Image (tube, rainbow, N blue to C red):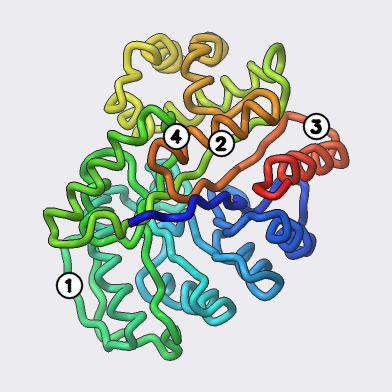
Amino acid sequence: MTRTKRWALSVPVDGFSLAELPELAREGERLGYTDAWSFEADGLDCFTPLAAVATATRLRLGTAIANVFTRGPATLAMSAAGVADLAPGRFCLGIGAGSQPIVEAWNGGRFVRPATRVREMTHVLRAAFAGERVVFRGKTLSVDGFRLGRPPAEPIPIYVAALRPGMLQVAGEVGDGVILNWLAATDVPRVVALVREAAARAGRDPDAVEITARLLVNIDPPGGEADVGVRRHVTAYLNVPVYRAYQEWLGRGPALGPMWEAWERNDRKAAVAAVPERVMQELIVRGSMADIRAHVQRYLDAGIDTAFLQVSTLEADPGRRRQVLGDALRTLAPRR
């Protein structure tokens, strides 16, 4: 199967309020962006930004991701049905397990058997979206008699966020797509192969699974304080246990070992300084606008079907930050 490569917005966009997001998305659509995929961590939830975009554009919409531990099956099904009602046939539900800090430290849950939780949630959601009365008892969740009162008029594809082999296998076996992040373009073929192989073993068409990725784009000119800021971001993320294990699996253990060692002895300054230049270049899309475009294209050439561009800057002034991020999205657009 040959897919058209898609350049997507990552929403919300720093510096723009939700009230301003529809106009920004309309402009993005005119400039050739095909999708808007949301994210959530410690800011906005993943559904509200998509609702803001839904009626203003014809963009495809997706969550990347809705957490399967912090929402129960019924709540997740109802939230997805709401966005699908606003954008029938244009909404993809991206789900994932998140990380230990989000699930346990922030929400008081237990981060256990994440691959099983995602697999079971996918099963329950498909039944709910079909309007069935769901009775399910699994290893990580149970549902007794829930029926979605307003099932979607059209099927909602379910995408699975995945890092290491166990979850990549789940994505290939049960997902309509996979959502990747924090990987280099050179990592893509290896990761995609695992998804395709799992789909084939499950008797599915391996080429039917869409490969998507959130790309972290820093638009500040490299050097000086910009490098320090990017290193801080890398350090904060890659010390989260699931991301550390992911980078070790990808083979960056030797390069990141000094950073992890400094972090473990609570020397945050040394940890930031220990992030290698090569790791920054591999995992963060940076440089001139031409460099950034070429880097995004390398991901697409390597096997990514849809790339969500999450642009960032260290610019502190709100007005200036808004201006440079908006300009970057316009310059990077497919129809610039």
Helix, strand or loop for disc 1: strand
Q: Marks 3 and 4: which is nearer the front? A: 4
Disc 1 designates what residue? 137
At label 4, which amino acid type do we have? Trp
Among numbered discs 1 and 3, the one appearing first in the sequence:
1
Distance (Cα) linking label 3 and label 4: 25 Å
At label 3, which amino acid type do we have? Ala
Residue 169 appears left or right of 43: left
Vertical placement of 305 versus 131: above or below? above
Q: In which quarter of the image is residue 21?
A: bottom right
Among numbered discs 2 and 1, the one appearing first in the sequence:
1
Say if mark 2 contacts mark 4, CB within 8 Å: yes
Q: Residue at x 32, y 84 (%)?
A: 130
Residue 253 % position (x, y)? 32, 17
Dividing the image into 4 quarters, which one contains the N terminus? bottom left
Q: Residue at x 42, y 70 (%)?
A: 76
Distance (Cα) linking label 2 and label 1: 38 Å
Among numbered discs 2 and 4, the one appearing first in the sequence:
4
Residue 267 visible, this angle: no
Distance (Cα) linking label 4 and label 1: 34 Å
On residue 216, the disc is 2
Residue 163 visible, this angle: yes
Disc 4 designates what residue? 182
Disc 3 designates what residue? 316
Residue 269 % position (x, y)? 57, 12
Q: Residue at x 48, y 33 (%)?
A: 298
